[in-house]
Amino acid sequence: MNTTINWEEILDSLKFNINVLIKDLIFIAVVLIICSIIMKIISAFTSRGISRASKMPDDPKARSFISYMTLLRSFSRYAVYFIAFCLIINYLGFGSVLSNVITAAGVGALVISLGAQSIISDLIAGAFIIFEKQFNVGDFVQINDYNGTVTAIAMRCTYLESWKGEKIIIPNGQIKTVINYSGKFNMAVVDVPTPYEEDSERLIGILKDVADKYYEANKTICYDKPNVMAINSFDESAVTMSIYLKAKGRNHFAVQRGLKLAIKKRFDEEGISIPYNQIVVHNEGSAD
């Protein structure tokens, strides 16, 4: 049986398919370009708002505004590209935009059932962080076991920067405990081990004098006058006394370091040794 190949029909079909493919690619490219332009506009708008807020006095309202701007940028990225995805599959003939949204929701439910609950948990947790104002961009916080300054709050993750410059990314759904150090004050606590042999009342007087002088010289970072606890505890090799000093927000680490240095210098001047663990080795049977 002889079969003849109609090359003309094949070429016409190829031309038609190529034209359709080119039109589809052009549409997809135009949609993606428009999305990119929209995201650049949103990014410029949020960046301008963040820049203006950063020049304001350091207060919770300014940090809250910056947080909303970072969240808006993150949410817009998800929304814009989701709409673009629906438009593209609708243009390619896979149903209407509305049916695509419903289908996407169904696919989302299927994905959740297959183990993507953590993503939804991250998104919901991110919304609660913002609406409950647990912390804002610019706050110094401890999240779980990580310390750092909040640099951005996105829909799914929170970004921290540690004092060592480390970029820490924490999924919002994994945030269990938060300590926010960006309030009006933080308590600087310095525990001072002192020798049992020294006069405790004399040591209390010295610590009060050191703490008072430190407060007078550093009022810009101190919130209130210091309080010296007479004796906090009796330990194995030392009597521990404690100094409590309210430091202005996020300055308690600096105050603690400054107090420790001032105490060490004063103890050296007074000839007071700070107790430390010692090991005594006895050699049995050694020759005299």
Image (spheres, rainbow, N blue to C red):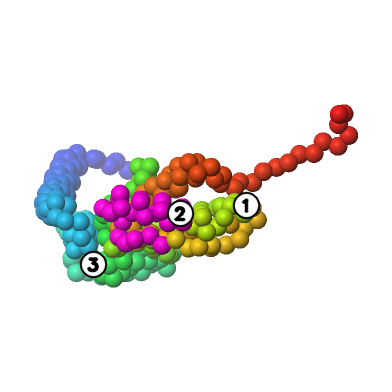
Label 1 neighbourhood size at 10 Å, few (<14), some (14-19), many (20+)? Answer: few
At which x and y percent is residue 151?
28, 51
Q: Which of the two discs, 1 and 3, labels the residue nearer the N terminus? A: 3
What's drawn in magenta, residue-wise?
205-227
SS at mark 3 in the image: helix
Which amino acid type corresponds to the residue marked 3 in the rendered image? Val
Work out whether 108 lies above or below 43: below
Disc 3/disc 2 C-alpha distance (Å): 68 Å
Disc 1/disc 2 C-alpha distance (Å): 17 Å
- In front: 53, or 287? 287
The answer to whether 285 appears left or right of 142 in the picture is right
At which x and y percent is residue 93?
19, 59
Inspect this view and state whether residue 214 appears: yes
> Mark 1 = which residue?
197
Where residue 96 sits, quadrant-wise, is: bottom left
Inspect this view and state whether residue 257 appears: no
- In front: 68, or 257? 257
The answer to whether 157 appears left or right of 235 in the picture is left
Residue shown at 35%/42% (left/top)? 165
Pick the quarter of the image with the C terminus. Answer: top right
The answer to if 207 sits in the magenta stretch is yes
> Mark 2 = which residue?
207
Which amino acid type corresponds to the residue marked 1 in the rendered image? Glu
- In front: 84, or 255? 255
Which amino acid type corresponds to the residue marked 2 in the rendered image? Leu
SS at mark 2 in the image: helix
Label 2 neighbourhood size at 10 Å, few (<14), some (14-19), many (20+)? Answer: many
> Mark 3 = which residue?
101
Q: Which of the two discs, 3 and 2, labels the residue nearer the N terminus? A: 3
At which x and y percent is residue 34?
11, 51
